[in-house]
Amino acid sequence: MLITGLIIAMLFGALDQTIVGTAMPRIVGDLGGLAYMTWLTTAYMLTSTTVVPIAGKLADLLGRRVVYISGLALFMIGSALCGTAQTMDQLIIFRGFQGIGGGIMMPMAMVIIGDLFTGAERAKWQGVFGAIFGLSSIIGPQIGGWIVDALSWRWVFYINLPIALIAIAFIALGLAGHERHERVQFDILGILTLIVGVVSLLLAFTFGGKDAPWTSWKILGLFALTVIALAAFVWAEARAKEPILPLRLFRSRIFVLINGVGFLMSVGMFGSIMFIPLFLQGIAGISPSASGTAMTPMMLTVMLGSIVGGRLVTKVGVRTQTVAGMLIMATSFYLLTHLSVHTASWVVTVYMIILGLGLGLVMPLLTIALQESFPKTELGVVTSSSQFFRQIGGTFGMTILGAVLNARSSAQLTDALGPFLKQAGNNPTVAHIQSMITTNAQGLYSSLLSPSALAQMPAAIRRAVVPVLKSTLVDSLHSVFLIGMLFVLLGVICALFLGRIHISNSRAPRAKPVAE
């Protein structure tokens, strides 16, 4: 009963993110606010990422049942509010509220799996749960399209309500008796300083280089606030009786290395995957739906790798499998640095299949290794830390590699198109291209490699500009994938120092952290 509830909750929580992406055009058409569309994702990301480590600690203090059901209830209420939104501002606020519930839900399934099973059993189950995330990426856009076409975008959120009620019922019954009743001292100062620090950091990454220059007072102020808040967080954690993220965990070599691998893996993974559709649509010339189809085999191999990896780790060990998976990922990035304007989309799909296999082998291991290295009294906080550092790594990767693409492409476009643009005179299209080169090269690629934008461009300018755009885009993406590969190779180095992590077959709780 409990496993059924966990699968239902994890599947609909993961599906929500891909389904909402499909519904965004209809949402904007109904509510307006095109300029704020990305905030539907950003608001959810800010709140869900920030609450993950808090949820993990609360699960250790209060018990799994009350925390998990609270997260499901908040997610359900947030979904209902999103469905009733009348303006884009309301929807953004409600998505942030929904993200609080999502951030509580995300680590809890893995925490409970850690409670229920031995290390060897846990590896198999976490492989299955990793496959669920892959499955949601495949079927989510299709489900979202069906819901929007048959009903309305509001049902993208309303559909969560009956599913959440079913999950709550199964989990409430399955976790009966899993509460803690002793008096708890909450680390209020730690919670507040962590929220301020993480939100400021994520906002700086979100706005930096796009909405404001990296050297502007807004971005520098956000980074300064991040440093001050996180310094206050460290001070608070050193004095708290029940710290949200105990500083002594960072004295553990395994804790630092495993979370380092997760961070570096996510930098490469999220930061690079987001640019593959740009190549498929802009260079290979396939449609957005076809580019999504081209990515599907990668998600299938993530699922396969997660399931196989969960069974293989007991035979080859955590360190060996982590190193192998990260090297497979690095191989994929290396192959991606050899893309050209003539590369067929099926070749890109093969490279992404290799990437998916590496990801599938590594992702379930990170949580297992942490859970096997710490006592069950700290299972919540160490499990949520893995999710937290991976999400921060993904945000960091998208920002850094996006900046690399913009800087590299701007320099190349200036060199390649400068003489032509000077000769073309004062044509409004030319003036627009000149301004985009220096301010938003990614936007230039996105706009000029769309059929409508190309149709509006004078033929002479189109013949001169488009080939240059394609060649410089490919060269710039080579830099992105190379940097992504370097981050993954840093993860390989971290994994080499892991040492031997024993995957137990015993149900006896670990009494203390592993010796370091």
Image (spheres, grey):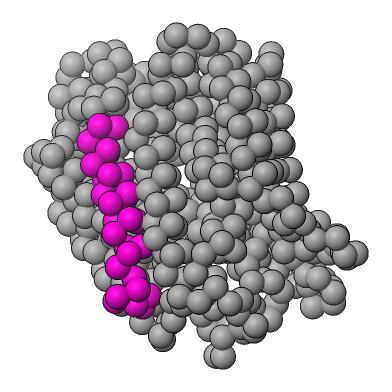
Residue at the (66%, 65%) spot, across then down: 381
Seen from this angle, which residue lies furthest right? Answer: 183
Residue 27 is covered by the magenta coloring: no
Q: Nearer the viewer, residue 408 or 164?
A: 164
Looking at the image, residue 454 lies above or below residue 40: above
Q: Quadrant of residue 112?
A: bottom right
Residue 485 is left or right of residue 258, and the answer is left
Q: Nearer the viewer, residue 315 or 266?
A: 315
Examine the rendering and report whether any part of residue 108 can be seen.
Answer: yes
Residue 19 in the image, given as x and y percentages of width and height: 47, 28
Residue 211 is left or right of residue 423, and the answer is right
Looking at the image, residue 472 lies above or below residue 61: above
Looking at the image, residue 75 lies above or below residue 363: above
| The C terminus - image quarter | bottom right
Looking at the image, residue 277 lies above or below residue 202: above
Examine the rendering and report whether any part of residue 215 can be seen.
Answer: no
Q: Quadrant of residue 468?
A: top left
| The N terminus - image quarter | top right
Q: Nearer the viewer, residue 386 or 430?
A: 386
Residue 301 is covered by the magenta coloring: yes
Residue at the (41%, 44%) spot, across then down: 132
Q: Nearer the viewer, residue 229 or 445?
A: 229
Residue 284 in the image, given as x and y percentages of width and height: 17, 33
Residue at the (37%, 24%) spot, across then down: 142
Residue 253 in the image, given as x and y percentages of width and height: 53, 83
Residue 265 is left or right of residue 81, and the answer is left
Query: Chief secondary structure of the magenta span?
Result: helix
The span shown in magenta is 292-319
